[in-house]
């Protein structure tokens, strides 16, 4: 029994020695016992300042700009979704409907005709280029068109150049000559001259078309050289009426041989227009007075009819 107590006391002393703490010793040299107070525990030395590459400034969060991040939804709205591209259908031009046949001659006329048809049908240049090879009954012409760069690329501008290069005229066709005007003057005089406003408008339309062409290509220097021809294309009564007015206004001067000098084209047209306007005004007044007289006659007939149908009413 005594031996057992001695053994237990030795174990307790040995355990006490193991748990004892020496002041100043580091925690690695001895283990802190459970009964040691916090104020008796050693304080680790304060570390010295560290050198850094960033200078000490105000808090960085003050200068950081605010950024707003906008996120797109995973499922875009119908407005954001792009509609699928729809291919435009080709506008087909029926060669039989417009009597188109490219035979290698007069290609310039055919090109102008095709472009007018395209405006009517709403076809694009690409539509024309794609169909040009089908507007011919000649297989050789069709093969030649298909081999042209403008046809392969669907480029109407280039295809026109290719067509004119192969089948076009060396010189452009001349539409009018100076003889065209002389023919117009002679035919008008043979028909009795210009006696009405409709005849005058028709004549001037043809005249100005020819003169514009001749002036454009410098076949004539000016249009004032035909004022005498225009005067003699008028009917006798129109010539007499405007001559009287032009003589009164000193625009038609007498020559030494007794004749008269015809004024320039601009003045001559002015008096012709004035004469037709006066005639239209007289015609309207006569028509109104005639209608008024007809109405008076009808009213008189109505009054007589009432008197005969109901005698003794007045």
Image (cartoon, rainbow, N blue to C red):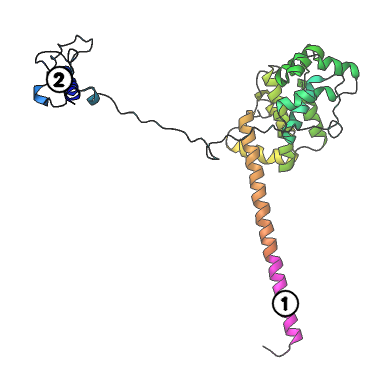
Give the residue displayed 69% in from the left and 68% down from the top: 295
Residue 305 at x, y percent in the picture: 75, 80
**Which residue is found at the position 70% from the left and 74% from the top?**
299
The magenta stretch is: 293-314
What residue is at 74 percent from the left and 75 percent from the top? 301
Compare residues 40 and 94 and report the one nearer the observer. Answer: 40
Residue contact at pointers 2 and 1, CB within 8 angstroms: no
| 188 relative to 88 in the view: left or right | right
**Picture quarter containing residue 104?**
top right
Q: Position of residue 300 (x, y in %)?
A: 71, 75
Give the mark nearer the N terminus: 2 vs 1: 2
- Residue 67 x, y percent position in the rendering: 34, 28
x and y percentages locating residue 167 in the rendered image = 82, 14
> What residue did someone put label 2 on?
13
Which residue is under mark 1?
302
Query: Which mark is in front, 2 or 1?
Result: 2
Quadrant placement of the N terminus: top left
Label number found at residue 49: none
User: Residue farthest to the front?
Assistant: 1
Q: Is residue 181 in view?
A: no
Side (left or right) of 259 relative to 58:
right
Q: What is the spatial separation of the Cα atoms under label 2 and label 1, in whole angstroms?
A: 161 Å
The quadrant of the picture occupied by the C terminus is bottom right
Query: Height in image: 100 above or below 107?
Result: below
The magenta stretch spans residue 210: no
Kindly state the secondary structure of the residue where label 2 is placed: helix
Q: Nearer the viewer, residue 61 or 188?
A: 61
Q: Is residue 300 magenta?
A: yes
Q: Secondary structure under badge 1?
A: helix
Image quarter of residue 214: top right
């Amino acid at each position: 029994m005594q031996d057992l107590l001695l053994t237990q006391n030795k174990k307790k002393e040995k355990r006490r020695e193991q748990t004892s703490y020496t002041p100043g010793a580091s925690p690695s040299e001895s283990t802190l016992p459970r009964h040691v107070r916090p104020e008796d525990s050693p304080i680790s030395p304060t570390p010295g300042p560290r050198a850094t590459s960033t200078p000490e400034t105000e808090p960085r969060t003050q200068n950081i700009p605010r950024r707003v991040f906008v996120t797109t939804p995973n499922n875009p709205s119908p407005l954001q979704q792009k509609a699928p591209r729809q291919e435009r259908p080709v506008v087909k031009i029926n060669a039989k409907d417009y009597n188109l046949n490219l035979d290698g001659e007069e290609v310039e006329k055919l090109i102008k005709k095709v472009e007018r048809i395209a405006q009517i049908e709403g076809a694009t240049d690409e539509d024309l280029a794609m169909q040009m090879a089908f507007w011919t009954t000649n297989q050789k012409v069709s093969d030649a068109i298909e081999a042209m760069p403008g046809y392969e690329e669907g480029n109407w501008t280039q295809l026109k150049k290719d067509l004119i290069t192969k089948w076009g005229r060396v010189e452009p066709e001349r539409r009018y000559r100076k003889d065209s005007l002389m023919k117009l003057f002679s035919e008008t005089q043979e028909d009795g001259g210009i006696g009405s406003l409709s005849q005058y408008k028709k004549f001037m339309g043809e005249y100005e078309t020819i003169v514009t062409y001749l002036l454009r290509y410098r076949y004539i220097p000016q249009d004032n050289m035909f004022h005498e021809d225009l005067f003699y294309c008028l009917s006798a009564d129109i010539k007499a009426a405007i001559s009287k007015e032009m003589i009164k206004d000193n625009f038609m001067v007498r020559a030494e041989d007794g004749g008269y000098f015809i004024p320039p084209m601009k003045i001559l047209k002015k008096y012709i227009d004035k004469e037709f306007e006066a005639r239209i005004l007289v015609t309207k007044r006569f028509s109104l007075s005639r209608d008024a007289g007809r109405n008076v006659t009808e009213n008189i007939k109505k009054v007589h009819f009432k008197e005969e149908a109901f005698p003794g009413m007045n």
